[in-house]
Image (cartoon, grey):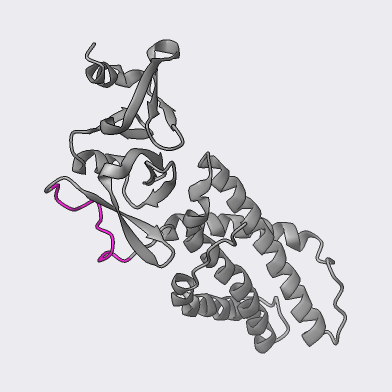
Amino acid sequence: MKPLPISFKAANQQLIWVLLIGVALGVANYALGAWPNLGHSMIQQCIISLVIGYSILLISFNAPQWFTKLKHPNWAYVILVILFAFVGVLGSEVQLLVEGLVFQGGSYQFLAGGGIYLFNAILTILLGFLTYRWAAPTLPSEELPTEDLSPEPPLDKIPIRRGEAILLHSVDEISFFEAYDNYSFLHDLAGDKHLCNYSLAFLEKRLDANFLRVHRKYLINQRHIHQIKPHLKGRFVIEFNDQKRSAITTGSTYNDAIKGIIKL
């Protein structure tokens, strides 16, 4: 199994803000009397800010690439909850370790934090999802155009993120797009899927007439339809001629589009 690709560049660019938040929390906690002196408070808060804050940023910036192989996008949220909760527990343990070894003369005991683990886990999950919604995927505007672009000629290339690089994927080799939050996955003729920074609404406007919306989640390339089969409640199953013979089920409100394809 290949290790998950991890890029530190985007998270490192936010590192100064993580440290400043730690300093601010240290001053605030000292002012509220939570710690015996200012230095103690600032050291503790900067450490926990680095452990939790930086870990959240790493996860948030890298997660979209990790999740491209998931069969169902909802699993991404389950994995994120587990990762963020673990970061909260880890941050708690590091905080207790520093407190015990540095400020209490070596009285550290492993996993002795009690309710602090649950508190920090819940807090980290909340902060993590807020950061994820902001950061994933964050790409410079000069690398990926935004949806405010005027719809000029139809797109013939789709930019996708591959680690630190931006690859241009030919639309002729795409069988369909699948909605994913405000972004989408493109499914290619090799049967693979890649995260795309465009929404289906934007793609529907910028692609040629061969791309057809057949479900609120799917935008298909008619050129790569292998077969269409009737399904329940007037819907259809569309199978594509990619290497994995991918298939999707159409939405019942898009029957006219399907009938236009099969000339009914």
Q: Quadrant of residue 177?
A: top left
Q: Position of residue 98 (x, y in %)?
A: 75, 80
Q: What residue is rendered at 49% in x and 69% in y?
A: 7
- The magenta segment is 140-151
Q: Is residue 71 left or right of residue 237?
A: right
Q: Is residue 200 left or right of residue 58?
A: left
Magenta stretch contains residue 87: no
**Where is the N terminus found, in terms of image quarters?**
bottom right
Q: Position of residue 47 (x, y in %)?
A: 64, 78
Q: What residue is rendered at 24% in x and 11% in y?
A: 264
219 or 23: which is nearer to us? 219
Q: Main secondary structure of the magenta part?
A: loop
- Count the marks: 0
237 or 19: which is nearer to us? 237
Magenta stretch contains residue 143: yes
Q: Position of residue 198 (x, y in %)?
A: 31, 49
Q: Position of residue 140 (x, y in %)?
A: 31, 66
